[in-house]
Amino acid sequence: MHRRAFLTTLSSLALGSGLTSCQESDRQVLRLLALKNSIPSQLLGEFSKSIQPANPRVELIAEGQFKEILIQLRDCYKMGTAEAKGFKVPLFAPAKSPEYIPNLASMGDAWLATAIQEKSIQPIEVKDLANWGKLDSRWHEIAQRDDRGNSSSTGRVWGVPYRWGTTVIIYRRDKFVDANIPIPTDWADLWNPKLKQRISLLDRSREVIGLTLKKLGYSYNSPDLNQAANLKFALEQLHQQVKFYSSDDYLQPLIMGDTWAAVGWSSDAIDLIQKNPNMGAIVPNSGTAIFTDLWVQPASRTNPISTKRAKLSQQWIDYCLQPKVSNQISLLTSSVSPLMTSLNPSEIIPDVRKNLLMLPPKAILDKSEFIYPISDVSKAQYDRQWQEIRQLKVVV
C-alpha cells in the first residue's frame, strides 16, 4: 500500500481511435507516462474534447512505480527514435519499447534530482503556462533546480506539480481508546511510553530523522545534525517504540492490530480510512513533510521537441491546473492539487475543503517542508546516524 510502490502491473489506455493509423497521421497525439492511479482516466477524454478543433488523441501508459518510469525515461534519452514512429502501446505486460517518447511523464519530487543528473528530463518553459503564476511560491521552489538537481532560486524549472500529500500519523482508534491513550496530535505523541513496540515507521532515514528533528524544533533539511541538541537521544527513544520498519508494508501490522500507530503517507491513509472507519490519521501540528508528483518533460539526444508537441504539453499542464480539473484530481486520486492552496475556499468542493487530512490548515502547511536533496557531507551524517540507531537493541 506504499504510495511509491504499488503493484508493478502495467496498464495502457488509448483514447480516440486507439493506435495510430494512416488516416489519422496528421492528428496530434498527447503521450503521457504516468504513475498508476495518479490521474483520473475521465480527464483524458475531457481534455481531448476541450482542445478544438484539433481534438488530439490521448495515449497513456500507467506504471506502478516511479523507478519504472525513470527506467523508461532513460531509454527514451539513450534510444529515442523519431516522433513519426508513434507511440507503441504495450498490449501485454510487461511489454515495453523505447520506440516512443512521451510528451510528459509523472515524477515524484524525491526522484527529480536523479532524473536531472541523468539528463533524462529537460527544463520546462513555464512563461507560456497560463496557470503557473496562480500557484503558491512553494510549488515553484520545489521544481526550481540547478543542473545537479539541487534546489536553486536561480535554477530552471524542471517540472510542474499536479498533486501532493503529506507524511502523517495513522492510528487505530479502538486500540487507543482501550489503552486510554489520547488521540495523537503531533510527533511528540509517538514517544508515549504506552506505545512501546506498538509503532511502525517508514524505512527511510530522511523521514524518521526528519520527524524527530521536527519534534525538537528543527528542519527536515537540517544540514548539520551535530547542531541538533538531543537528536541522538530522541532517536534512541523512538527506536524503542518501533516494532516494524517498512516503506512498503507499514499498514499491514496496523490493520492486523500488531501495531497501534504508523507513520505513512496521506494518500495511503485516506484510502485506508475510507475502507475502515476504525482507522484515523492526523497531520502533525508542528508541521510535516510534503511530497509532490510533477509533470516532467522527457529528454532525447536525437529528437528535438516540435513546436506543436511542446504546445500540446503546455495545454495539458495548464488543463491540470484549472480549478474544476484540480478539484477532480484532488477528489479522485487521494492526493491534492497544488492549486488548492491558493484557491478561494468557495472554489474548492466540500469533500476536499473539509477533509483536513487532504488539505491541512494553513497554519500547519506553513510549518511543513519538502524534503530537499542535501550535500554529500550532510548525507553521510544522516546515513551514519540512521545505521547507528537501527543497530540498537530494543530493551523489552
Image (spheres, grey):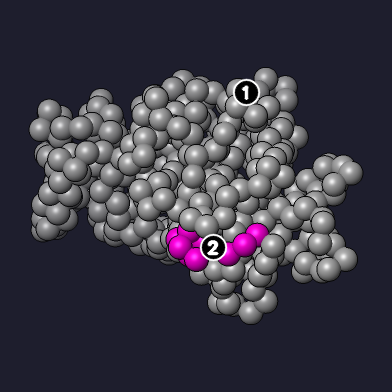
Q: Is residue 118 left or right of residue 385?
A: right
Instruction: Please name whichever residue, 380 or 282, is drawn nearer the observer in this view of the structure.
Output: 380
In this view, the mark in front (1 or 2): 2
Q: What kind of residue is marked 1?
A: Lys
Residue at 63% from the left image edge and 51% from the top image edge = 103
Q: Which residue is mark 1?
A: 134
Residue at 62% from the left image edge and 62% from the top image edge = 82
Region of the chain picked out in magenta, as a range: 74-83
Q: What kind of residue is marked 2?
A: Gly
Does residue 41 lie above or below 53 as drawn? below
Q: Check disc 1: other Cα within 10 Å, few if <14, some if 14-19, many if 20+.
A: some
Q: Check disc 2: other Cα within 10 Å, few if <14, some if 14-19, many if 20+.
A: some
Residue at 65% from the left image edge and 60% from the top image edge = 83
The image shows a total of numbered marks equal to 2
Q: Residue 232, how many percent across, how many down?
A: 12, 40
Return the mark for residue 60. none
CA separation, marks 1 and 2? 34 Å
Q: Which residue is mark 2?
A: 80
- Residue 111 showing in the rendered view: no
